[in-house]
Image: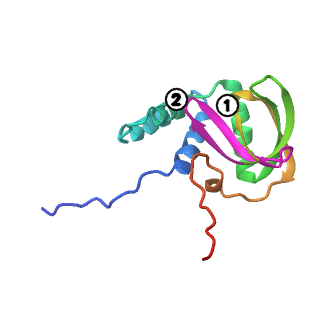
Amino acid sequence: MAKVVKPQTRPLTTAEIAALALSLAHLGSGPQAVTARRGLQHAFEHLELDDDVIATTLATLTEPLPTDVASRARLIADAITSRMIVRLHYQDATGRVTSRDVEPVTCLVHREHWYLVGVCRMRRGIRAFRFDRIIAVEPTLTPSRPHLADRFLPFQRRKRATKAA
């Protein structure tokens, strides 16, 4: 009998894990969401983790979001997909509330928190907004410019411009 050789597979990228996890996070706690989260946990079990930050982040990916946060996450995910600007009512770490128009790019998890990463029109730059500090999300009818998510992910090294000799 001939031995079947399984083709080599590549690990999921950070962006793929974030997209899968966001899809699961805003599904809530129904039976399909629970089964899907179990599948994601199973995928993580095969990763060799020697970093507590990564382990905590992966655990957060498999937890359902609270109902009110999940509702806002759905609006954010829809805005990312349809490339539409959203208006966030956001409470910062000091308790100050602002309204900001944001071009949403991607969502990610770091440790035990979910973040929306996007271009903040008020600050004119890339910002990360913690989901649990977003008080409300208002969809707009204003199109957003297309942005590649991998250019906005934190913790990645930026290539420095080298001077010609």
* Left or right relative to 115: residue 2: left
The mark nearer the N terminus, 1 or 2, is 2
Which residue matches tag 2? 31
- Cβ atoms under marks 1 and 2 closer than 8 Å: no
Q: Distance from label 1 to label 2 (Cα)?
A: 16 Å
* Dominant secondary-structure state across the stretch colored magenta: strand
Residue 34: give x, y in percent of width and height: 50, 30
Question: Can you tell which quarter of the image residue 164 is in?
Answer: bottom right
Residue 57: give x, y in percent of width and height: 52, 34
In magenta stretch: residue 11: no
Q: Which mark is residue 70?
A: 1
Can residue 32 be spotted in the picture?
A: no
Q: Magenta segment range?
A: 105-125
Q: Which mark is residue 103?
A: none
- Quadrant (top left/top right/bottom left/bottom right) for the N terminus: bottom left
Residue 4: give x, y in percent of width and height: 22, 60
Residue 90 versus residue 164 in the image, above or below: above
